[in-house]
Image (tube, helix red, strand yellow):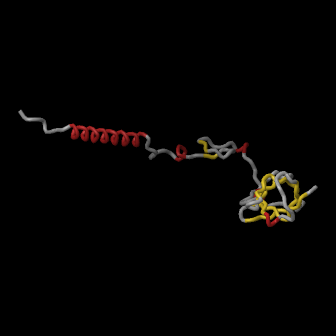
């Protein structure tokens, strides 16, 4: 009597093929059960409530908010110029004399401002109180016209 021509690998492949076929049939039945064709327009309608959330219930017209079209801002809000004092006070938090740069902590805004040795009127060191002006550089704010205060 001869051996069966089917091997374990063939059986596994056939099982996987049968499983895929069953899954495909199940997905098709699921699609048929959840088919949206033939639904009325009201069943497919979605509404947006007064808070901007999607809802199946129409919004209450009494909760409607009136918005003035002139109050809507598209883009960045306009910057209002304040009375700006160009001279600021600060404390040197770090300064490396060998490399020629450091940082000043602005006392008004508590920002850290970069300072280069070329912008110093006199030598400074850490924890010195200074006055300075700022200018925008490609990498952010940098201090210019830096002077020690007493």
Give above or below for 107 relative to 24: below
Q: Out of 149 and 71, give the one closest to the viewer.
A: 149
Using residue 137 as the reference point, say whether residue 121 is left or right of it.
right
Q: Out of 41 and 127, give the one closest to the viewer.
A: 127
Q: Out of 135 and 90, give the one closest to the viewer.
A: 90
Residue 35 horizontal/vertical position (percent): 43, 43
Quarter of the figure with residue 143: bottom right
Quadrant of the frame with the N terminus: top left
Q: Out of 3 and 122, give the one closest to the viewer.
A: 122
At 73% across and 61% down in the image, what residue appears?
A: 99
Quadrant of the frame with the C terminus: bottom right
At 84% across and 58% down in the image, what residue appears?
A: 124
Residue 113 horizontal/vertical position (percent): 79, 57
Residue 68 horizontal/vertical position (percent): 77, 55
| Identity of the residue furthest to the bottom in this view | 118
| Identity of the residue furthest to the right in this view | 150
């Amino acid at each position: 009597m001869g051996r069966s021509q089917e091997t374990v690998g063939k059986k596994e492949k056939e099982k996987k093929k049968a499983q895929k076929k069953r899954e495909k049939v199940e997905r098709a039945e699921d699609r048929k059960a959840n088919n949206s064709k033939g639904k009325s327009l009201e069943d497919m309608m979605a509404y947006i409530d007064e808070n901007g959330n999607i809802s199946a219930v129409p919004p209450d017209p009494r909760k409607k908010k009136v918005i003035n079209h002139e109050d809507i801002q598209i883009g960045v809000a306009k910057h209002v110029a304040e009375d700006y004092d160009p001279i600021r006070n600060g404390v040197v938090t770090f300064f490396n004399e060998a490399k020629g740069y450091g940082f000043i902590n602005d006392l008004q805004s508590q920002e850290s401002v970069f300072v280069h040795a070329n912008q110093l009127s006199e030598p400074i060191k850490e924890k010195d109180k200074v006055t300075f002006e700022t200018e925008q550089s490609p990498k952010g704010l940098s201090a210019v016209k830096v002077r020690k205060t007493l």
